[in-house]
């Protein structure tokens, strides 16, 4: 039987491997594969073929709606009228919201990633007998495995 598990690259992985060796699993039956991090910076703007789930227009749409209502309301007292001031408010609010989202994504989220560091994950593969599988799984869960899967050979 093979047991696959994923870990963050930390000391918990080393402790799990050490405890597996103490419980009778030989070094030849333990295989650790580190995953590499993406080196290329993600694109901000999505295309029709892929999307990363980050929306830069949601705040812009909300602020554009709010500013257009305020602009149209004030436009009854101003010279160009409510339609022009509503459009000016919509464009101004959308641009302000877009710039806020862009600032948050480029500056604040990037700073959090740099402070946290990009630690990769490690896939740990353990070959064992069927009667050892439960004990090995408990050891891996105890040492903070992110996920575990069993495969019958």
Image (tube, rainbow, N blue to C red):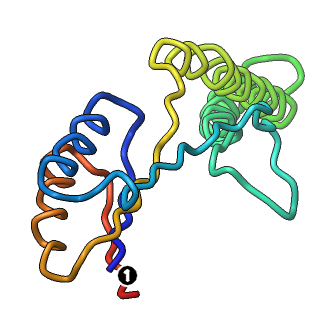
At x 30% / y 35%, what residue is drawn?
14
Question: Could you say which is closer to the camera, residue 116 or residue 127?
Answer: 127
How crowded pointer 1 is (Cα within 10 Å; few <14, some 14-19, many 20+) is rated as: few
Please name the residue that numbered disc 1 is placed on.
151
Judge from the rendering whether residue 32 lies leftward or rightward of residue 15; answer left or right. Answer: right
Residue 98 quadrant: top right
Question: Could you say which is closer to the camera, residue 56 or residue 107?
Answer: 107
At x 66% / y 44%, what residue is drawn?
55
Q: Position of residue 29 (x, y in %)?
A: 37, 61
Viewport quadrant of the N terminus: bottom left
At x 39% / y 53%, what residue is drawn?
6
Residue 34 quadrant: top right
Q: Position of residue 24 (x, y in %)?
A: 16, 58
Viewport quadrant of the C terminus: bottom left
Give the residue furthest to the bottom: 152
Residue 151 quadrant: bottom left
Q: Secondary structure at mark 1?
A: strand
Residue 31 appears in view: yes
Question: Could you say which is closer to the camera, residue 94 or residue 3?
Answer: 3
Judge from the rendering whether residue 5 lies leftward or rightward of residue 48; answer left or right. Answer: left
Judge from the rendering whether residue 69 lies leftward or rightward of residue 88; answer left or right. Answer: left
The relative height of residue 152 versus residue 74 in the rendered view (above or below) is below
Q: Position of residue 66 (x, y in %)?
A: 60, 34
Judge from the rendering whether residue 33 lies leftward or rightward of residue 12; answer left or right. Answer: right
At x 54% / y 27%, what residue is drawn?
118
């Amino acid at each position: 039987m093979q047991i696959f598990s994923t870990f963050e690259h930390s000391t918990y992985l080393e402790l799990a491997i050490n405890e597996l060796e103490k419980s009778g699993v030989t070094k030849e039956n333990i295989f650790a594969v580190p995953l590499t991090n993406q080196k290329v910076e993600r694109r901000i703007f999505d295309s029709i073929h892929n999307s990363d789930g980050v929306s830069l227009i949601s705040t812009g749409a909300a602020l554009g709606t709010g500013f257009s209502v305020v602009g149209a309301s004030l436009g009854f007292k101003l010279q160009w009228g409510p339609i022009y001031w509503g459009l000016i408010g919509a464009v101004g609010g959308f641009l302000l919201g877009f710039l806020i989202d862009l600032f948050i994504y480029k500056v604040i989220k990037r700073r959090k990633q740099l402070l946290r560091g990009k630690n990769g994950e490690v896939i740990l593969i353990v070959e064992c007998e069927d009667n050892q599988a439960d004990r090995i799984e408990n050891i891996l869960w105890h040492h903070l495995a992110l996920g575990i899967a069993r495969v019958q050979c």
